């Protein structure tokens, strides 16, 4: 795990530092100095995903399971750094699918940060590629997002169905608006 932590870039290091501090103390960190310039100057939607390594060391490879994932489709805060900090706290302790992360789990976390590119409206599933594009499905006020290149999501149809489910849109409901986006994945 120490090797992985040493290889993390500034985006993932910021998310990890935020999560560790908040889980240990309940205090959200301030934006630190010495980050890459774009983290202070640019704005974008950001997703922080947290997986946890299994305690069972007998398994081949690293058995990882999702432990939290929260993000913003569009920027809410004045910088990517602030977006990461807020979403890292939310992913760690506010994802309604999971209990809050506990201090004894911190050394087993695998963290990734996805910085979203601009949304592009599309008119056909043919314009999607599950490895390259994430998808946003919208109907009225309901909106669901699924990131690209996720394990177990192998077809565009699966990707759209999962995004619809997240939005509370019935699988057979038509008249949905589709948007695609690319991400820069850190971690």
Image: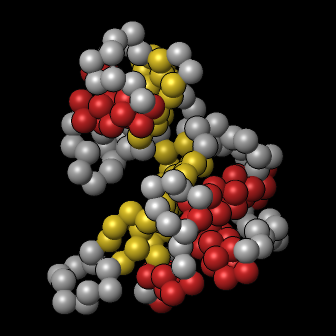
Q: Is residue 22 above or below residue 183?
A: below
Image-quadrant location for residue 173: top left
Residue 48 in view of the camera: no
Q: Is residue 142 above or below residue 33?
A: above
- Residues 11 and 154: in front is 154
In the drawing, does residue 116 fall left or right of residue 57?
Answer: right
| Residue shown at the point (46%, 62%) measured from the top left | 98
Residue 172 in view of the camera: yes
- Give the quadrant of the N terminus: bottom left
Q: Is residue 58 above or below residue 43?
A: below
| Residue shown at the point (32%, 86%) measured from the top left | 55
The extreme top residue here reads: 175
- Residues 170 and 8: in front is 170
Q: Position of residue 72 (x, y in %)?
A: 61, 43
- Residues 76 and 3: in front is 76
| Residue shown at the point (37%, 29%) measured from the top left | 164
Q: Position of residue 14 (x, y in %)?
A: 66, 69
Image-quadrant location for residue 36: bottom right
Q: Position of residue 134 (x, y in %)?
A: 41, 38
In the drawing, does residue 127 fall left or right of residue 32?
Answer: left
| Residue shown at the point (76%, 50%) measured from the top left | 79
Q: Position of residue 156 (x, y in %)?
A: 26, 32
Q: Looking at the image, how many numbered discs can be counted on the residues?
A: 0
The colour scheme is: secondary structure
Image-quadrant location for residue 132: top left
In the drawing, does residue 186 fall left or right of residue 33?
Answer: left
């Amino acid at each position: 795990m120490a090797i992985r932590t040493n290889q993390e870039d500034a985006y993932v290091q910021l998310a990890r530092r935020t999560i560790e501090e908040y889980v240990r103390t309940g205090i959200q960190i301030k934006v630190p100095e010495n980050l890459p310039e774009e983290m202070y100057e640019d704005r974008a939607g950001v997703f922080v995903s947290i997986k946890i390594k299994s305690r069972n060391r007998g398994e081949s490879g690293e058995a990882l399971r999702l432990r939290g994932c929260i993000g913003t489709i569009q920027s809410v805060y004045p910088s990517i750094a602030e977006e990461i900090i807020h979403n890292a706290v939310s992913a760690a302790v506010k994802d309604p699918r999971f209990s809050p992360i506990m201090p004894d789990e911190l050394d087993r976390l695998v963290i990734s940060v996805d910085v979203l590119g601009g949304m592009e409206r599309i008119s056909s599933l043919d314009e999607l590629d599950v490895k390259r594009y994430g998808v946003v499905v919208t109907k009225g006020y309901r909106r669901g997002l699924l990131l690209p290149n996720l394990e177990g999501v192998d077809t565009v149809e699966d990707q759209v169905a999962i995004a619809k489910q997240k939005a509370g849109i019935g699988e057979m409901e038509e008249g949905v608006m589709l948007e695609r986006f690319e991400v820069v994945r850190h971690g």
